[in-house]
Image (cartoon, grey):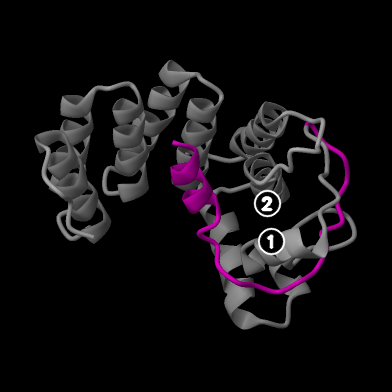
Amino acid sequence: MRSRIRVSLARTGPLLVALLVGTPARADDPHMTAAEAAALPRWCLVYNQTGNLAPHFTKDPELGAKLAGFMRSGCGGHHHYCWALVWASRGYFREESNPTPANHYYGVALSDFGYTIGNSRDTCSLLPDIHTKSGELEAALGHPKEAEARFRKVIGLKPSYAPAYVGLSDLFESQGKNDEAIAALQAGIKSNPTSNALKKKLARVQARTSGQVPTP
């Protein structure tokens, strides 16, 4: 499950290097490094001195449009979403010499995700991603019921959102519930017939459970 979460949280791609400056809120500002900032979505780096993301603070029309779209959809507390990604990453890539346990970072990440949820409407376009990543963190913390509830929340919000079905299937696999894992993926394909990620994941699970060698 940990490797699956690492992939999900690292899916943001290579981006601009900058630091976010923010005001304290429910969860702590991670005071991220330049390397951590570089792993974030580019829109996370459009940040003004008051801690508010605002479209007019970027000269990049694409980033401005993305931020404006988040706001129109009902998202608030965007910066905490960005902070949560940093905290989660620190947990995954924690060095053995670091006395802080990975679970601490996961817990703070969940708090930051919760802040964004609490300051957003149900129509916020970031919610499927937030709840999916929160489900992965709950699973990493050993909270399977909470993790399942998160994934099912996403499916209720956006039935075509493939990562939620993948997360749910991973959770079931980690519990030895292979039939449930397969059923989750089949349900995902029914809702999103064009998802190659779900089809490949289903083929791997079916091949593994049948003793066959999965196709890469």
Q: Disc 2 marks which amino acid?
A: Cys
Q: How far apart are the two marked residues, 2 and 1, measured between alpha carbons?
A: 6 Å
- Label 1: which residue? 44
Q: Quadrant of the N terminus?
A: top left
Report if residue 12 lies within the magenta region: yes
Mark 1 lies on a secondary structure that is helix
Q: Quadrant of the C terminus?
A: bottom left
Q: Is residue 195 above or below residue 84?
A: below
Q: Residues within 10 Å of mark 1 (few under 14, many from 20)?
A: many
Q: Position of residue 56 (x, y in %)?
A: 74, 73
Q: Disc 1 marks which amino acid?
A: Cys
Viewer-closest of 114 and 18: 18
Q: Is residue 158 rendered to the left or right of residue 96?
A: left
Q: Which mark is residue 82?
A: 2
Q: Is residue 16 rendered to the left or right of residue 123?
A: right
Viewer-closest of 209 and 153: 209
Residue depicted at x 83% and y 53%: 51
Q: Is residue 40 visible?
A: yes
Residue depicted at x 90% and y 60%: 49
Report if residue 47 lies within the magenta region: no
Q: Is residue 161 visible?
A: no
Q: Position of residue 212 (x, y in %)?
A: 11, 44
Q: Quadrant of residue 113?
A: top right
Query: Upstream in the sequence, badge 2 or badge 1?
Result: 1
Q: Are marks 2 and 1 in contact (CB under 8 Å)?
A: yes
Q: Position of residue 78 (x, y in %)?
A: 67, 50
> How many numbered marks are there?
2
Residue depicted at x 52% and y 27%: 138
Residue depicted at x 86% and y 50%: 31
Q: Position of residue 106 (x, y in %)?
A: 65, 33
Mark 2 lies on a secondary structure that is helix
Give, as a single range, the part of the protein colored magenta. Answer: 1-26
